[in-house]
Each structure stands twice: as structure tokens, then as C-alpha cells.
């Protein structure tokens, strides 16, 4: 076995918004041990964390009951405004743990819609964060579309051309390359394009650092949920730089496939706990003994 050099990215694991959401959810239960506490949808995209919260008595629900009691938490991805109303109408006490960066995107989208911009949201239409952003903008305009490719925007080309101005916001965990692709296309068909690069700083720094680490690595290991947008984007970016494997946890890692890798870089998504990252590092080190 060759001696392997393992380097962990500095910006790996929980971002501020995720850390805040997880810690607040735990604190809520600690301060209200006898109250029913539930989260509408997965608080973050990580099975280990969801299981840990479940063991603490914090339930994940996927549908709102007509009548509820206790505290209902809105997760870090945010929700459409009507969902907030439904939570209150069901009788829950509402605790909003929407990431502050996501809130900023929602507000930018609202401002654009109010000011008669044709709003383009760069993101995945079925992602919970994007659903919330679009729902907020939809309250003020019927000219709101979601896209990550030129093909998805093309059906709206004539509408965009005839509209005086186009405003762009971005899902916080999107890739800069996707934003650039959309903006370059819009510049060819729109009279005026106002761009709000709302990719959060944590995502931007994580992607930049991981790319730099990949340049000096034979193998990059990306740790995090396959449902996590920022984690899958990381893996996608790094595959263009060096050999890359995306795993959810150490159980998926088979180092026998990478025995010849000398320099191994490790990064992780914003919803990956440090404990999961540590187990991956330990497993690699065990194989190098």
C-alpha cells in the first residue's frame, strides 16, 4: 500500500445556516421537553442528522395535519407563504428556521417582481428552496420562470424579448457556471438584464477551495447526501478536475478501488456533520496502515 496524503478542505461540512437550524431545533426540544416538536420536511438533506433529531423526539413530517399542536419548524430551505399560513391555521406555534441567505433571495425576487421585471430564477424547479423563492415572487407577478439550462428558457424567449427588463436571482447552492450560462443567453435576447448573484458565500468559497484542492489531488472524495444540491454540484465540478467519488458516509467508501491514489482531497456538503466526515477520514487511514 502506498503512503497516502489526506487533506481535508477548510470549508467542509456545516455552513452557518445549517448549523443554526440544527442547533436551534435541538434547543427547542431541550427548552420544551413536553411539547410536540415537528419539522415540515427534512430540516437539512442528511439522513444521519434527521435520525439524530428523531431520537431526540423531533419528528419530521411531510404533510401538515388539519389540526396540530406544539411547535412546527420551517426548515432551512424555506417554504411558500401559503405554507406559513397553513401551519398557523392548523394550530401550531410557528418557528421559522429559513436560512438568512435564502430569505435574501426571496426578498430580491419579490423586489424584482414588484418593479415589473421578468424574473428568472436560476435553479432546480423541484428544489424546496426554489419552490419557496418562486412562490414569493409569484405573489407580485405572473412573469416568473425557473431554469438551469438555455433549453428551459427558450420557450419564453419571445416574452423576454418583448419585456423591457429582466431580473435574475439564483438558488443559493447553484454553480457559478450555470448562472453565467443563463446570463450570457439572456444578454442576447433581453433589452436590460439586472443580475443578483445570490449564490451564498459559503457555497462560493466551498466550490473555489475544492477546485484548488482537486488540482493537487489524485482523488477527491465528496461527502454528503445525494439529495443535497450543494453536495452534488461539488461532485459535478470536481469530476472535471480529477478522479472524484461522491459518498454519503464511510459505509460507501471502498478504498481498494483507489489504492494507487497518493494525494487524497476530502470535501463535504453544507449539510454534512463533522462526525460523518471524521469517520470517512478514519476509514481511509485504517486502509493505509
Image (tube, helix red, strand yellow):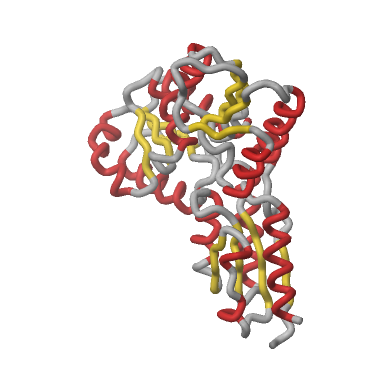
Q: Quarter holding the N terminus?
A: bottom right
Q: Residue at x 62, y 28 (%)?
A: 97
Please tell me which residue lies in front, 11 or 95.
Answer: 95
Q: Position of residue 27 (x, y in %)?
A: 74, 30
Q: Residue at x 39, y 30 (%)?
A: 119
Image side of residue 127 versus residue 238, left or right: left
Q: Residue at x 51, y 67 (%)?
A: 239
Q: Residue 50's image quarter?
A: top right
Image side of residue 54 versus residue 196, left or right: right
Image side of residue 119 versus residue 238, left or right: left
Q: Is the residue 236 above or below the residue 182 in the image?
A: below
Q: Residue 60's image quarter?
A: top right
Image side of residue 252 versus residue 284, left or right: left
Q: Position of residue 243 (x, y in %)?
A: 54, 73
> In the rendered picture of this protein, how many numbered marks are placed on residues?
0
Q: Quarter holding the C terminus?
A: bottom right
Please tell me which residue lies in front, 82 or 153.
Answer: 82
Q: Position of residue 23 (x, y in %)?
A: 72, 35
Please tell me which residue lies in front, 264 or 249.
Answer: 249
Q: Position of residue 271 (x, y in %)?
A: 62, 47
Is residue 279 visible from the viewing direction of this image?
A: yes
Q: Is the residue 103 above or below the residue 114 in the image?
A: below
Is residue 104 visible from the viewing direction of this image?
A: no
Amino acid at each position: 500500500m502506498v503512503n497516502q496524503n489526506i487533506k481535508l478542505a477548510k470549508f467542509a461540512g456545516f455552513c452557518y445556516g445549517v448549523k443554526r437550524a440544527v442547533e436551534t431545533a435541538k434547543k427547542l426540544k431541550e427548552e420544551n421537553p413536553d411539547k410536540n416538536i415537528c419539522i415540515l420536511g427534512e430540516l437539512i438533506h442528511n439522513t444521519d442528522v434527521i435520525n439524530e433529531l428523531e431520537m431526540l423526539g423531533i419528528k419530521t413530517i411531510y404533510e401538515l395535519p388539519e389540526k396540530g399542536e406544539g411547535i412546527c419548524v420551517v426548515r432551512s430551505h424555506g417554504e411558500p407563504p401559503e405554507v406559513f399560513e397553513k401551519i398557523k391555521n392548523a394550530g401550531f406555534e410557528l418557528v421559522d428556521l429559513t436560512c438568512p441567505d435564502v430569505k435574501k433571495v426571496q426578498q430580491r425576487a419579490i423586489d424584482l417582481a414588484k418593479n415589473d421585471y421578468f424574473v428568472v430564477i436560476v435553479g432546480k424547479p423541484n428544489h424546496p428552496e426554489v419552490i419557496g423563492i418562486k412562490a414569493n415572487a409569484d405573489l407580485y407577478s405572473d412573469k416568473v420562470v425557473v431554469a438551469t439550462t438555455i433549453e428551459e428558457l427558450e420557450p419564453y424567449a419571445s416574452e423576454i424579448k418583448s419585456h423591457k427588463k429582466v431580473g435574475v436571482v439564483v438558488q443559493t447552492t447553484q454553480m457559478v457556471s450555470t448562472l453565467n450560462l443563463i446570463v450570457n443567453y439572456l444578454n442576447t435576447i433581453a433589452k436590460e438584464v439586472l443580475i443578483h448573484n445570490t449564490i451564498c458565500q459559503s457555497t462560493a468559497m466551498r466550490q473555489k477551495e475544492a477546485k484548488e484542492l482537486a488540482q493537487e489531488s489524485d482523488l477527491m472524495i465528496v461527502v454528503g447526501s445525494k439529495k443535497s444540491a450543494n453536495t452534488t454540484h461539488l461532485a459535478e465540478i470536481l469530476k472535471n478536475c480529477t478522479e472524484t467519488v461522491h459518498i454519503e458516509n464511510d459505509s460507501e467508501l471502498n478504498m481498494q478501488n483507489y489504492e494507487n491514489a497518493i494525494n487524497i482531497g476530502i470535501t463535504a456538503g453544507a449539510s454534512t456533520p463533522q462526525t460523518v466526515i471524521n469517520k470517512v477520514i478514519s476509514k481511509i487511514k485504517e486502509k493505509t496502515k
